[in-house]
Amino acid sequence: MLNMAALITAAVVVLIAIAAWRMGSAWLKYRGKRVITCPESRTPAGVSLDVRHAASTALKGDLKLRLTSCSRWPERAGCGQDCVFQIERSPEDCLVRNILMHWYEGKNCAWCGRPIGEIHLAERKPALLTADRCSVEWNQVPADDLLQTLATALPLCFTCHIANTMVREHPEMVIDRSRAAVTGNQ
């Protein structure tokens, strides 16, 4: 009788582990903002998926994706969500963070010239130098404008971005040592 109880417990643990793996895999795979091409307008749109729905349907073995947000909503909120097919076909390629990481590969900082190098999402992330010569962080660029912004932006390392931000936001606290010193003996 003891062996039967242990066997049932082991089977339950295995089933729970399989369920957790299915749900966790779907949640990790489909979370985050994405850039897709809207099938109606043929323009980039920023979307997010309902990851809870994806995880729960993955548990049942019949994964179904649906959007929770789109940059074209609320005007086009009743659309057929045909763009989901793009995400199903290539979930990693339309993920904003992957688009950015690929864009930075092999690039050097536009100001200091140092290589951007490997990017760690939890650490000091590089920024973008926009066409108007302003540095911005990734999350400041709407997903639907990302591809257009990357076409004209330059990469900035974290250090140069922080320095640029400090000069822009607090010029009274910055000393520019590249200019000649001003003395009172002139």
Image (cartoon, rainbow, N blue to C red):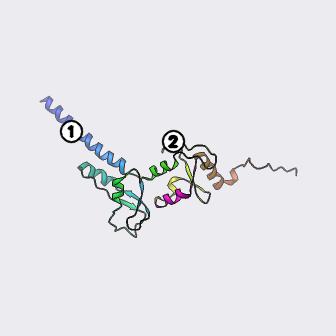
Which mark identifies residue 60?
Answer: none
Q: Nearer the viewer, residue 66 or 170?
A: 66
Q: Residue 80, located in which quarter of the rendered image?
A: bottom left
**Residue at image x 41%, y 52%?**
93
| x, y percent for residue 180 | 79, 49
Which residue matches tag 2?
Answer: 118
Q: Position of residue 164 (x, y in %)?
A: 63, 52
Q: Is residue 149 magenta?
A: yes
Query: Crowding near pointer 2: few (<14 within 10 Å), some, many (20+)?
Result: few
Label 2 SS: loop
User: The disc labelled 1 sits on which kind of residue?
Assistant: Val
Mark 2 or mark 1, whichever is nearer to me: 2
Residue 178 percent location from the top left of the image: 74, 48
Looking at the image, which residue is at 46% across and 61% down?
144
Of helix, strand and loop, which mostly describes the magenta segment? helix
Q: Residue at x 21, y 34 (%)?
A: 10
Which contiguous range is marked in magenta?
144-156
Please tell me whether residue 62 is drawn above or below residue 71 in the rendered image.
Answer: above
Query: If the image is split into quadrants, where does the N terminus sit?
Result: top left
Amino acid, disc 2: Glu
Q: Residues within 10 Å of mark 1 (few under 14, many from 20)?
A: few
* Residue situated furthest bottom in the rendering: 75
- Which residue is disc 1 drawn over? 12
Mark 2 or mark 1, earlier in chain: 1
Q: Is residue 43 magenta?
A: no
| Residue furthest right in the image | 186
Q: Secondary structure at mark 1?
A: helix
The residue lying at 49 percent from left, 43 percent from top is 120
- Disc 2 and disc 1: Cα gap in Å? 42 Å
